Amino acid sequence: MSVLRPWSGALSSPGSRSWRCYWWWWCWVVVFGVAVGSGDPWMSAEACPSSCTCSGSRISCVDPERGINAFPVLQSEAEMENITDIYIANQSSFSSINDKDLHYYKNLRNLTVTNSRLTYVSKLAFQNNFKLQYLNLKDNNLSSLSWRIFKHLNISYLILSGNPLHCSCENMWIKLWLGEEADTQELNCIEDGGTRKPLSKLTLPNCEVPKVTLTPSKVTVMEGENMRLTCTTSGVPSPELIWNMALVTNYEIETSGQISVLRLSNLSSLDHNSKIICTAENIVGGKESSLVLDILFPPKITKLSDAISDHHWCIPFSVSGNPQPDLQWFRDDKAVKEGDYVKTMIHDVTEIEYHGCLQLDSPTHLNNGHYMLVAKNIYGSDRKEVEAHFMRKPWDGENEREPYYYDLNPDTNSDLNPDTNPGAPPGDSHEDKVAVYVVVGIAAVAFTGFLLMLVILKFGGNSKFGIKGPSSVISNDDDSASPLHHVSNGSNTPSSSEMGPDAVIIGMTKIPVIENPQYFRSTNSLLKTDTFVQHIKRHNIVLKRELGEGAFGKVFLAECYNLSPDQEKILVAVKTLKEASENARKDFHREAELLTNLQHEHIVTFYGVCVESDPLIMVFEYMKHGDLNKFLRAHGPDAVLMAEGQTTRPVELTQSQMLHIAQQIASGMVYLASQHFVHRDLATRNCLVGENLLVKIGDFGMSRDVYSTDYYRVGGHTMLPIRWMPPESIMYRKFTTESDVWSLGVVLWEIFTYGKQPWYQLSNNEVIECITQGRVLQRPRTCPKEVYDLMLGCWQREPHMRLNIKEIHGLLLNLAKASPVYLDILG
């Protein structure tokens, strides 16, 4: 492969179309040390042995003449971490895989060592390769292989045919593990006399997988008591008994033959919900038996912090106790009455603790005071106190006995009369008073005229929606958010001269109508013949205010009556259909059927339609905090720069909150994939944020408000989000679940950069060149290594090599569960 150097022609030639792409790449290398530490997938020729060929993610060594005797060692750990495939063949000097040979190939998924002289694989050979799924060791000199090599891996394919395996007890696990696959591979083993026999027919005396029993199987015991557990095993060869646990409680182990006793003394409440495992292992395999400790103990308040503010005020706390304690709040020794505006919220539950807060919605000085939390269960109670100050009293810093206003007439106010109080300021002259009255009068007249003009402008034209009657009331509540997004008039908005006849006006800018071809091709299974779309009466919709205007019509915040059996009215986002042509109506009903069938906790809820008269209306769930991109920017390090008129710095998102956001989006994408739906435009701008950091996917390609600088215009009618698209989508317009996985990786990058635009330093054409040439986005500063590894798994060039969407969700879920998320900070 070609070598990229800072002085190469690729960089210095003015005629090169890709010089800026290379220039930016080289800047990243110099400034951030990309080539050493951050995992850039392109490596120079010196990093690859002469007998092998290397690409960004693959190493292949097949030359028998210039052979190798061990795995290649590349120039940096980062380069080795990017490798997902290693293929070695025809290497007569390659005889072993040792403990550290693959230590730095942490993302290795496929390994082939075939037609070589491999005779030994260490039990720790793959200790650092947790992602390994495909292992091909065909046609080597392996006589035995231990099951312990693979016990921590999730191997999907293991190929061992063509090896001189012994018909020994040590290889019995291969028969048991492969099952019928042993015959498919034509696996044979060699008996002591040299006779070959199918491995599937191997039967040996005194060679069986052990059995293990842990008694008692369930334990509920008080804190401070003692406990005895007995682990009994059987099997031949005689198994080894191993206890596996991480306990604070002191313990002793006594083992005699095939029985082992674990004695726990003075049980600690910190071990509640801890798992104890007893494992029996021999050369044939291993079995385990386990239980979870259920330790009863009185409550303990481990944290009660000062009140913090964001969308709601919150007094954070952490409480432990089993059974779960009842919580009671007191303010100034009086019980706090909880309701819609003051309530206890539990946001996260760990093995032994409940994390939450006392949430107060818009508290005033009347809520200030000395707060006490009391936690009780049947075994005891605990209490902690904290001072909470939400707002200054109106008279703070003043003499409370002073009036809020004064009579400035020195004749009636003796304190201000210079005749009776020499220290008082001199009174105003009669002329000054007259001047003040005149100015005030003029201002009052001008203000009244201004109000009249506003009323005329607001109500003089046609009413919004063309809805008449008392239900079409526009109120002035200051709420925001909708399942569609506001138009951003960026510099890349297409000019009117370049638009076709199907372009529509958004504000003062023409934007082409955007169709999603994949939407129509991939949703046949969702458009069921018996789909029932809920119809909502127009008089039940009360408009509050306009939120924005998109290519297909306007979006309003509204109140909807009789929609929920639990509430008289709820806030909703209402989308109208601007164009009433036959094709537009068909698309409207098609989309309504599709959205009705998409029901998931992380997909924005579609309530129904109103088609009694024009304009046609769709009713969506209202998401309080708007689109995720703006939300991320508002809670990032540059929030003050982005805010209009805001001087206080908002609370910055934590890493655990970012993971919580990411796993919710992944959950929604798992559902869409299960419905054979290809989104095609997954990005943070198309996700919405609700209460308690609830995130939902809220755009389906057909009805899209455009963040204009995020899209690239192709021809006159197509706008593509190329910064979120994989190479096959850019070059061949191919959209699949795998292309959505690529986009999900970019969404993760957006989340951990607090909403930055991918490739923000490059133009659209330069982005296309970089992506099609195999470049990937750099690791964000706040991003954990595990998450960036996941991003790289989404950005594999070959679609079939990308991570599975379910696997992504599982990994994010595990990372998100690693630490509690205090959602109350974000309301």
Image: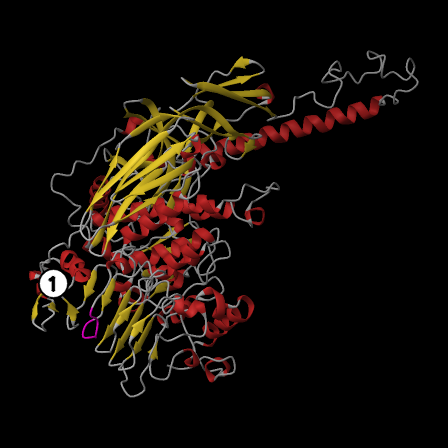
Q: State the extent of the magenta-drawn residues as a range.
A: 138-143
Looking at the image, which is closer to me, 36 or 706? Answer: 36
Q: Residue at x 25, y 46 (%)?
A: 671
> Which quadrant holds residue 152?
bottom left
Q: Residue at x 30, y 56 (%)?
A: 740
Can residue 141 be found in the magenta stretch?
Answer: yes
Rendered location of residue 681, percent (x, y)? 32, 54
Number of other residues with Cα within 10 Å of mark 1, as a class: few under 14, some 14 to 19, many 20 or more: many
Looking at the image, which is closer to me, 247 or 819? Answer: 247
Q: Is residue 550 in view from this perspective?
A: no
In the rendered image, the quadrant that contains the N terminus is bottom left
In this view, the residue farthest toward the front is 256
Can residue 117 be found in the magenta stretch?
Answer: no
* 600 to the left or right of 785: left
* 421 to the left or right of 378: right
Above/below status of 708 relative to 224: below
Specify the amino acid type for callout 1.
Ala
Per the image, the residue denoted by label 1 is 182
Looking at the image, which is closer to me, 24 or 65? Answer: 65
Secondary structure mainly formed by the magenta segment: loop
Rendered location of residue 265, percent (x, y)? 41, 31
Looking at the image, which is closer to me, 248 or 227? Answer: 227
Q: At numbered mark 1, what does the secondary structure look like: helix, strand or loop?
A: helix
> Which quadrant holds residue 465?
top left
Rendered location of residue 704, percent (x, y)? 34, 50
Rendered location of residue 111, percent (x, y)? 27, 68
Above/below status of 198 relative to 64: above
Q: Is residue 644 in view from this perspective?
A: yes
Above/below status of 813 relative to 81: above
